[in-house]
Image (cartoon, rainbow, N blue to C red):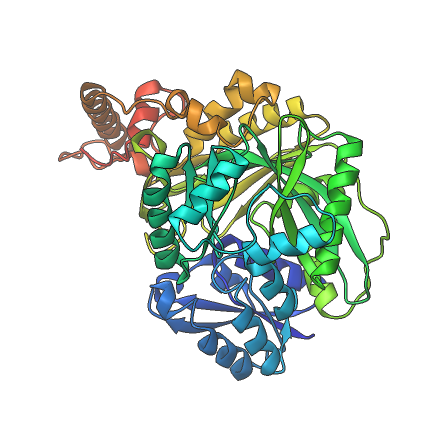
Amino acid sequence: MKKVLIANRGEIALRIVRACRELGLGSVAVYSDADALATHVREADEAVRLGPAPSAESYLRGELIIAAAKAVGADAIHPGYGFLAEREWFARAVRDAELTWVGPPAEAIAAMGSKTAARSLAIAHDVPVVPGTTEPLRSAEEAAGIADRFGYPVLLKAAAGGGGKGMRVVRDASAMASSLEAAQRESRNAFGDDAVYVEKYIEGPRHVEIQVLADRHGRCVSLGERECSVQRRHQKMIEEAPSPAVNADLRRAMGAAAVRVAKAAGYQNAGTCEFLLAPDSQFYFLEMNTRIQVEHPVTEAVTGIDLVQWQLRIAAGERLPFTSNIDPRGWAMECRITSEDAAHGFLPSAGRIEYMRIPAGPGVRWDSGVGAGSEVTLHYDPMLAKLIVWAPTRAEAIARMHRALDELTIHGLETSREFHLRVMEDDEFQRGAIDIQWLERRLESLVGAPAPRELVEAAAIAAALFAERDRRQRAPGMTGAATGSAAEGTLPEHQPWARLARQQGLRDA
């Protein structure tokens, strides 16, 4: 391998560019028209335009990506996460083009790409799964019969699903037919496949996942667990490593189960096995994500292992240097900073980032593909950055994350910063008393109510008066309308009215 084309965008593309540079590899970015001036495009050694902003016309065009790799002489393709990362056909197409695929074999993607197939594989290798079916449901009557056998509540899940799509909790027989129809329709629209299966619904579980690395020489190891229970609508928002609910014995058992599944699938490269962890510490295999994960930095922080570099090393044929599972050191936590307005139902926010102050200091890491001047559009995922911290203990990690979030300043659009600050201050979160429904139960107290109109108007007046005074002080004798703005960074940092003005995106008077 000499030159790697990165079939992705944003922070993960920049992350891969940096890994390539440290390994002495050339890097090639691809971009849509919306990303022509993006950070990952500027930082890569070369860049190739794919097409218009919609991902269906750019980042999801596998044939254009392979053609771009050929045109610039790249000999490998790293898919990052999302887009084409877990598409079996794309992995095969890259291999057929005689390029190196930085990921698992297409056969392993196929084996783990269907939840029902993955369940069958896990069962065959003595890995516990939630009681349920391994074949898609044919009718509501069949589903009701299975639910009667397991006992309600049950969970309907899309076989090809992810991110909560095609998923419905059914608590009694009267809701089965409508729930199955809705799950099939949503699955068909999202994945082009309406296959749905049923499993027993576990009350109050945690979402705990195990990171594995496997090389081409038969060596596969677990790098420990990540706690991913802070979710909204099945979308992760905060992750940490290790999990406050996992002790050393449970870590070994879950790690061994993940390694068995990975080996059974013929897995290579980095991958993640997802488990439900019940309150009684019984764990159940859910699925395997056949790619690098968004939350991989917390594992890197507690193990000292660069997962993206090892993806590249494994793809180039290197052997893993460690033979046993890795135990964590200290505690790491990650907040996904998104361009969303938490106080208004997490509505997406778009616009130009006018000013950004990035947190720093001991144990703080900032993974982002945007900066001051970046245009944030509605074409792609709203994640702006990942804020990661490490500390010796969980309590110290929470305190460090709170400090880092307090330092973070982004002007020009709404972000999830305030929401994450409130989570760090929450007593239940601090005690680790969380499960996958925790955030939905606590959401109202964590997002805060929208500011009353009269306060917003008062903040606007105060901001305008401050800007006018600032303008007059800078240019004595000038007259005319106020020209200062919250976005220009002229407002005082700690005044409540100034914070509200910035949060509301108030500009000139």
Residue at 66% in and 26% down: 280
In the rendered image, the residue lying farthest to the top is: 427
139 and 312: which is toward the camera = 139
Q: Position of residue 370 (x, y in %)?
A: 45, 50
Q: Which part of the image, by quadrant, shows the N terminus? A: bottom right
Height in image: 276 above or below 32? Answer: above
Q: Is residue 328 in view? A: no
Q: Position of residue 423 (x, y in %)?
A: 49, 25
Q: Is residue 114 in view? A: yes
Q: Which part of the image, by quadrant, shows the C terminus? A: top left
Which quadrant of the structure image shows residue 248? Answer: top right
147 and 240: which is toward the camera = 147
Residue at 31% in and 47% down: 350
444 and 37: which is toward the camera = 444
Q: Is residue 181 left or right of residue 49?
A: left
Q: Position of residue 178 (x, y in %)?
A: 32, 43
Height in image: 499 above or below 178? Answer: above
Q: Is residue 488 left or right of residue 232?
A: left
- Give the tally of numbered discs: 0
Which quadrant of the structure image shows residue 457? Answer: top left
Q: Position of residue 83 (x, y in %)?
A: 47, 61
198 and 68: which is toward the camera = 198
In the rendered image, the residue lying farthest to the left is: 480
Q: Is residue 393 left or right of residue 144?
A: right
